[in-house]
Image: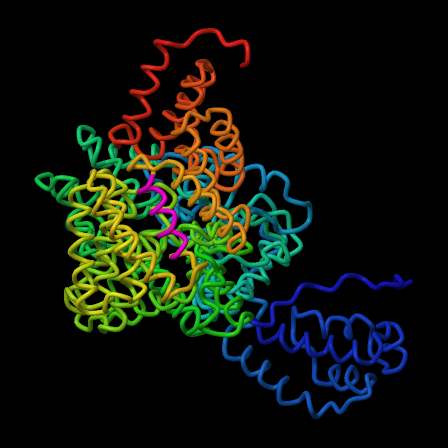
């Protein structure tokens, strides 16, 4: 009696065996006919049910009479199958009969300890103990009756193949055979399986085709247990799908650069991470013997970002050149990365080259989606981490960008999160070194320019998260601008880059990162000066920004000299009443005031304020800044009532124009409280400063320069009011914040430290604290 569901049919491999392909066509025909039982087909055709079932079994070619009966019962024309049947018949006649080929099911064992690992495991293998344990766990949890195991995936050179070799070697007595197959193409998979056949069965006919030889190995694997297949460098999952579908209890480890839905094939994805910096240093030191060059070892480990292929390549390079220092190697790597990374190890000339390892993936991506290649080329000039995916939206439709980054992710060239993507530093270096022109750099500059917020970087608080996201990529662009290329950037592109650097410098300055801001101001002024000339309006804008950067770092004389020269140039090129000239003049006046030239400062501020009111209007932020500066001049001159009145007027105007919590509004509150302090109105001063401090803490954070300034002045007022303990506490917080943000040598840090030391000498227990 036939079971309702029928006996499970033999697994077929139509890609490998023409007979299997013909048998599959018969199965599909029967399926279209409603899956009649073979017993019913036998009654209707006069053929035995065994002959009919074997016709679609794939083990032997049915007679033509059986094919006629099978096809006719399923209501199709047998003649449409004749040509395919004859092709299989002729193919099988061209080689030895099936009866001369050993039966894979009856062959009980493979030769003991059969293995074809491609090489010995590396002697120095570090940082992968947890990964080896995880591979063992995944293989140990493999389901019964199916081929299953991990797929080790990640960037080319991350150590997937080495990890598989290490695991297989350590467990060589547990599995038999351990068989390594290069799985990048169908031809290589077939060749690997065919080699397994010939190692298991020496009697296998020499004349047999690769297809039949590989098919025999698959049938052998399906009939035996205890084996381990390592399918290395899988590119297309379809190539290994027939192996993974076999009903067997052997196990598989696959490796792939691609990040795909491996679980659909019964494989558990296992991402291989980068090595830690400490492990990278240890690996380099042990392989190269350069233990004494500790600083350079760490620097090189940072550059290679935990990539074993690059680390081992560098170690081999250094071993073979003991006279080359690590510092020299790093210099050559920076100057000529393609040459250094493309140098073959003398002792191992067949080892994979670093650059070529990734070029294979890049070529594959480019063949599928040129947009993905364009995005990768742009990413080579940005910071390596947390690149906003939305940055690429001007290049194509959002879904096209999504598809392109998904493709790059699938080849492990980048990693993706919901909003960001990242790329390995060395991948960036290799890609940049292959560029013959600056087109990708120009695209990166243009994308950043259009992504920058348009409002004032120093005061538009809502934009600061976006600035924080983009600033690392602007810094990377700044480093790349000096790269020599046969086809350089256009003048227009250089000017755009100068603007990107300038605006980001203002953001850093507003955050108190003065060293970073000065570096970008200087770079902006330099590239614009070379491209546009020293007196171009845009070059002057960068020079003006640099003057402010110098002032923030305590280089007051240099700052005032540069700002004054820039003001003169702007008056000559733009005119006295141009907004840029007026802004420049207002800040020069502040500098004059701070060095004690009160009369000159006051006169310049008055004239600037009058011009700003006329040109920009009474409530423009620049006009209000000039008014605030004039109040500061009055206070410096001892005209406290006039100063307080003007600060109060400015505060009201800023609240109306900018809002209660705008940084400029809080500046006016702070200055008004300072005016009360100057007149000895300590209660009003404390109240105003405490309100401002609370607001700045909420808006700007505890370490922002403005917050620190208010905290510092409040401490001074508390000390004057006899609230010594509170003053000490505030100064301790200020010193800690300024040391962290500005460094120990900044004038503001030193001022806070001196004030703290003096206040501690007079501090007494304070019941109000």
Of the pair 511 and 486, the residue shown nearer to us: 511
Which quarter of the rendering shows the N terminus?
bottom right
Instruction: Say whether residue 113 is visible.
Output: no
Residue that lies at the very extreme toward the top in this rendered image: 765
Which span is picked out in magenta? 623-634
Is 629 colored magenta in this rendering?
A: yes
The mark tally for this picture is 0
Residue that lies at the very extreme toward the left in this rendered image: 323
Vertical placement of 154 versus 287: above or below? below
Choose top left, top right, bottom left or bottom right for residue 75.
bottom right
Which quarter of the rendering shows the C terminus?
top right
Of the pair 142 and 7, the residue shown nearer to us: 142
Of the pair 310 and 716, the residue shown nearer to us: 716
The colour scheme of the drawn protein is: rainbow
Would residue 260 appear left or right of 46 to someone viewing this image?
A: left
Vertical placement of 304 versus 391: above or below? above
Is 174 colored magenta in this rendering?
A: no
Q: At 65% across and 67% down in the image, what residue appears?
A: 12
Q: At 51% across and 65% down in the image, what residue appears?
A: 236
Task: Give the dominant element type of the magenta stretch: helix, strand or loop.
Answer: helix
Vertical placement of 616 versus 414: above or below? below
Q: At 25% across and 49% down in the image, what residue appears?
A: 589
């Amino acid at each position: 009696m036939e079971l309702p569901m029928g006996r499970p049919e033999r697994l077929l491999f139509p890609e490998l065996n023409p007979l299997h392909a013909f048998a599959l066509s018969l199965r599909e025909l029967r399926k279209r006919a409603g899956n009649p039982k073979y017993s019913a087909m036998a009654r209707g055709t006069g053929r035995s049910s065994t002959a009919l079932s074997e016709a679609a079994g794939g083990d032997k070619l049915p007679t033509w009479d059986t094919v006629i009966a099978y096809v006719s019962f399923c209501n199709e024309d047998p003649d449409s199958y004749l040509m395919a049947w004859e092709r299989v018949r002729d193919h099988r006649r061209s080689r030895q009969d099936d009866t001369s080929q050993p039966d894979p099911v009856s062959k009980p064992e493979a030769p003991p300890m059969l293995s074809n690992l491609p090489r010995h495991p590396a002697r120095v293998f570090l940082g992968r103990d947890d990964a080896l344990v995880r591979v063992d766990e995944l293989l140990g949890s493999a389901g019964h009756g199916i081929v299953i195991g991990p797929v080790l995936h990640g960037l080319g050179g991350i150590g997937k193949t080495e990890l598989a070799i290490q695991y297989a070697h350590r467990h060589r007595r547990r599995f038999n055979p351990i068989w390594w197959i290069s799985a990048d193409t169908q031809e290589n998979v077939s060749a690997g399986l065919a080699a397994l056949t010939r190692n298991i069965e020496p009697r296998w006919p020499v004349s047999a085709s690769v297809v039949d030889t590989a098919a025999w190995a698959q049938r052998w694997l399906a009939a035996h247990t205890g084996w381990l297949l390592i399918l290395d460098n899988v590119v297309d999952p379809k190539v290994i799908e027939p192996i993974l579908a076999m009903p067997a209890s052997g196990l598989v480890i696959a490796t792939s650069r691609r990040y795909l839905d491996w679980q659909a094939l019964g494989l558990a994805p296992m991402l291989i991470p980068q090595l830690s910096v400490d492990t990278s240093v240890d690996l380099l030191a042990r392989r190269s013997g350069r233990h004494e060059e500790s600083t350079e070892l760490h620097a090189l480990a940072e550059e290679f970002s935990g990539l074993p292929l690059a680390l081992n390549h560098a170690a081999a390079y250094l071993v073979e050149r003991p006279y080359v220092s690590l510092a020299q190697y790093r210099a050559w790597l920076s100057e000529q990365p393609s040459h250094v990374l493309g140098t073959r190890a003398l002792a191992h000339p067949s080892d994979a080259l670093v650059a070529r390892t990734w070029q294979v993936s890049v070529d594959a991506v480019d063949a599928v989606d040129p947009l993905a290649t364009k995005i990768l080329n742009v990413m080579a000039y940005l910071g390596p981490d947390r690149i906003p995916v939305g940055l690429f939206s001007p290049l194509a439709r959002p879904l096209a960008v999504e598809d392109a980054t998904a493709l790059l992710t699938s080849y492990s060239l980048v990693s993706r999160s919901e909003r960001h993507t990242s790329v390995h530093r060395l991948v960036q270096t290799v890609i940049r070194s292959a560029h013959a022109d600056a087109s990708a750099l120009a695209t990166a500059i243009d994308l950043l320019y259009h992504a920058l917020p348009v409002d004032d970087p120093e005061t538009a608080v809502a934009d600061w998260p976006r600035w924080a996201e983009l600033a690392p990529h602007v810094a990377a662009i700044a480093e790349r601008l000096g790269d020599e290329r046969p086809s350089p950037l256009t003048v227009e592109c250089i000017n755009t880059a100068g603007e990107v650097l300038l605006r980001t410098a203002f953001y850093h300055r507003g955050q108190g990162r003065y060293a970073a801001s000065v570096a970008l101001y200087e770079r902006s002024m330099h590239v614009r000066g070379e491209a546009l000339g020293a007196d171009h309006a845009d070059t002057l804008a960068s020079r003006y920004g640099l003057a402010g950067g110098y002032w923030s770092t305590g280089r007051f004389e240099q700052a005032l000299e540069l700002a004054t020269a820039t003001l003169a140039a702007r008056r000559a090129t733009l005119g006295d009443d141009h907004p840029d000239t007026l802004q420049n003049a207002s800040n020069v006046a502040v500098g004059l005031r701070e060095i004690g030239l009160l009369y000159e400062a006051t006169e310049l501020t008055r004239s600037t304020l009058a011009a700003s009111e006329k040109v920009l209007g009474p409530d423009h932020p620049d006009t209000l800044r000039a008014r605030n500066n004039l109040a500061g001049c009055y206070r410096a001159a001892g005209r406290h009532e006039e100063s307080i009145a003007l600060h109060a007027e400015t505060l009201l105007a800023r609240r109306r124009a900018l809002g209660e919590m705008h940084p400029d509004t809080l500046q006016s509150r702070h200055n008004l409280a300072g005016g009360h302090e100057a007149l000895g109105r300590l209660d009003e001063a404390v109240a105003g400063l405490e309100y401002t401090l609370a607001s700045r803490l909420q808006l700007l954070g505890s370490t922002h320069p403005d917050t620190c300034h208010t905290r510092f002045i409040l401490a001074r007022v508390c000390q004057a009011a006899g609230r010594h303990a509170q003053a000490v506490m505030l100064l301790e917080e200020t010193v800690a914040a300024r040391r962290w943000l500005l460094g120990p040598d900044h004038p503001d840090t030193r001022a806070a430290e001196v004030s703290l030391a003096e206040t501690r000498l007079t501090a007494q227990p304070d019941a109000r604290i």
